[in-house]
Image (cartoon, rainbow, N blue to C red):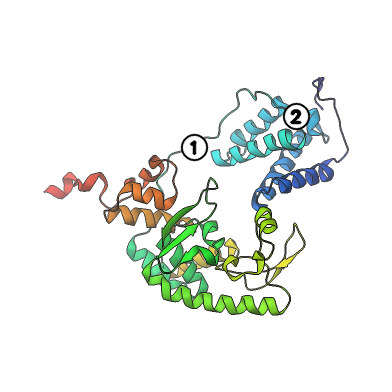
Amino acid sequence: MNPQPRPAKAAFVLANPKAKLLDQVREVLRVKHYALRTEEAYVMWVRQFLKFHRDRTGGWQHPRALGATEVGAFLNHLANAKHVAASTQNQALNAIVFLYGSVLQIDLGELGEFVRASKPRRVPVVLSREEVSRLLGALEGTWRLLAQTLYGTGMRLMELLRLRVKDVDFERNQITVRAGKGDKDRVTMLPEKLKSELQRHLTRVKLLHEQDVRAGYGEVYLPEGLARKYPNAAKEWGWQWVFPSRSRSRDPRTGKVRRHHVQETGLQRAFKAGLQLSGITKPASCHTLRHSFATHLLEGGTDIRTVQDLLGHKDVATTQIYTHVMQKPGLGVKSPLDTF
């Protein structure tokens, strides 16, 4: 226990307060319309925060009995003992600040100094054009189409999986990415080579949707505000996922049975198997296709500002990292060894 709890936060210790508290966290997250993935992450970090102080003191403590000092100790633990990445530590901090500010209505005040997890500068893994071709050739079916779209558009994995039919414009050869990183929309290209295959894919998806409607289903998840404003939109074709899952499932938050989009783990497994089959030894992931998209555009002479817009980067400095992995860095400067 905190030996000298702050007067404004009387010590409140329970044998096991987790269940009730975590339910409160979930409720506020849902009221504020946070994504399910964010909800899962925040609940996990609150649980880890409480467990850390239980292990230190030998008993569960309600967060009202803890404060900025204890939060700082947990963040130090993540950096020093767990060696987490800077983004991971930041997510943990955001979750705990949300717990105190939005759930418990407590102002933590200044956290003071704590060890910031290091954020080493690393150049991204990039596949060559030949390696991309081999990888795509090692995939098949929907997995191949997903990978082609990732490489051909530069979208992030979850941006692609959350793509809706209405946001694919075949006439203008463009795709609108909704609520990307930073909750911003942007437009990227629809590769000409993808159009025919993607249209055939959507023909099959539409038949599947019509089958769901006949069976009494066919609703797709919509943000709560949209669902209230357009009560019939959830069954409309334009709002359906471009890449729906093979089977329907129950939404853990509402209990409704819907057809969700494809899970990222399925593509990640297929991608890993494709790497092995194609003999590529680079430590690549689905996100590598986005890195390769950007690098190959820059190598082909595309203006860096254009690439920045296509990727949805807020700062061009983020896009400039790809200049370090181009085949001709430094505007084609030759190595002195090649001058002999």
Q: Is residue 339 visible?
A: yes
Tag 2 secondary structure: loop
Q: Residue at x 84, y 40 (%)?
A: 17
Residue 243 higher or lower than 29, as above or below: below
Tag 1 secondary structure: loop
Residue 279 higher or lower than 51, as above or below: below
Task: Please count the marks in the image.
Answer: 2
Reading the image, the residue beneath label 2 is 106
Front of the two marks 2 and 1: 2
Mark 2 surroundings: few (<14), some (14-19) or many (≥20) residues within 10 A: some
Q: Is residue 126 left or right of residue 178?
A: left
Q: Is residue 93 left or right of residue 274?
A: right
Pick whichever, 280 or 68, lies toward us. Answer: 68
Instruction: Tell me which numbered mark, 2 or 1, is placed earlier along the sequence.
Output: 2
Quarter of the image containing the N terminus?
top right
Reading the image, the residue beneath label 1 is 119
Among the 4 quarters of the image, the one containing residue 282: bottom left
Q: Position of residue 335 (x, y in %)?
A: 19, 46
